Amino acid sequence: MTQSDPTGMHEWHSGEYVKEWIGSYTNEDRTASLRRIVHLIPFDPDRPISVLDIGGGWGPISALVLEAFPNARVTLHDFSEPMLQEARANLAEHANAMSYYRGDLMSPEWTAGLKGPFDAVVSSLAIHNVRFPDRIHAIYDEIFPLVAAGGCFINLDQVSSGDLVRNANRHAQAMSRRQQVFEETGRWTPLAEAAGGGPGERLHRHARASEEDLKRIAAAEPATLPNQLRWLTDAGFDEVECFGRERGSALIGAFRA
């Protein structure tokens, strides 16, 4: 078993941490973002499609897939056994349409037990957790043969940015928090106070990244949006598109003819 996150940001093997993480991310904005992923799957809603949910966690995308495609069959993949346990409980009413698969995206063997290809492969805020850009690039190569002809890979995930863009995103987040505080209290807070971080900050940082891992990340071609689009094209997808940006994340679609 490898560690949850090479940078020490998350501890996905902890049941307590997983429950806290789920509680911090179940909101209407997240549901709307995930529904955008599902609506990009280019099939008739009545079709009995097969779907792979990579890093599916406790099952929010899988639930929305089955809402939009009631005849679908979904395989939910995750590395975390506590997440898979939560998913089985949350999706119990869809037991006949669901299957579960544990695999470590850090290893090229993570696809070994999957029964593809799939009409659609979906993912949200999962693949970036491997942290190594060269590994993300390889995962895209490994996803391509899992997608059937006429199918798609839809991914909403964090993308890397340069310092100027990263600072602009952080500034925008602080400004949004400042606006929210004003709407709730009628008081404008100093920007530095608003930049102090949201409730999710307390979930972060469980260990230090090793010097070796930091050097590997720094040496690799960064996982920027242009690079990720190119990696998917190089993997073999016929058309690749960015359907929108949300702060530090991008909604990317890759399609096979």
Image: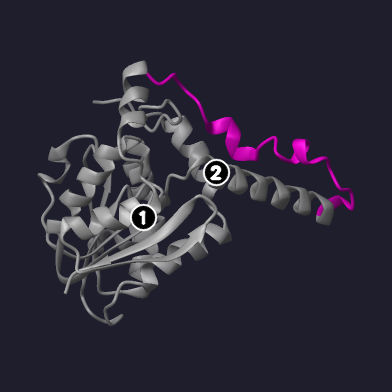
> Of marks 1 and 2, which one's residue comes earlier in the chain?
2
- SS at mark 2 in the image: helix
Position of residue 212 relative to residue 31, above or below, is above
Q: How is colour applied across the structure in the image? A: one colour
Are there few (<14), some (14-19), or many (20+) residues within 10 Å of tag 1? Answer: few
Q: Position of residue 164 (x, y in %)?
A: 56, 44
In the rendered image, which residue does mark 2 sit on? 166
- SS at mark 1 in the image: helix
Position of residue 37 relative to residue 206, above or below, is below
Q: Quadrant of residue 254?
A: bottom left
Q: For the residue marked with disc 1, what is the amino acid? A: Pro
Q: Position of residue 95 (x, y in %)?
A: 27, 59
The residue that appears at 31% across and 72% down in the rendered structure is: 41
Q: Which quadrant would the N terminus be assigned to in this image?
A: top left
**Residue 57 badge:** none
The residue that appears at 57% across and 61% down in the rendered structure is: 28
- What are the residue bounds of the magenta stretch? 184-210
Q: Position of residue 155 (x, y in %)?
A: 35, 58
In the rendered image, which residue does mark 1 sit on? 226
- Looking at the picture, tell me which residue is in the foreground, 88 or 212: 212
In the image, 82: left or right of 107?
Answer: right
Q: For the residue marked with disc 2, what is the amino acid? A: Arg
Position of residue 112 relative to residue 122, above or below, is above
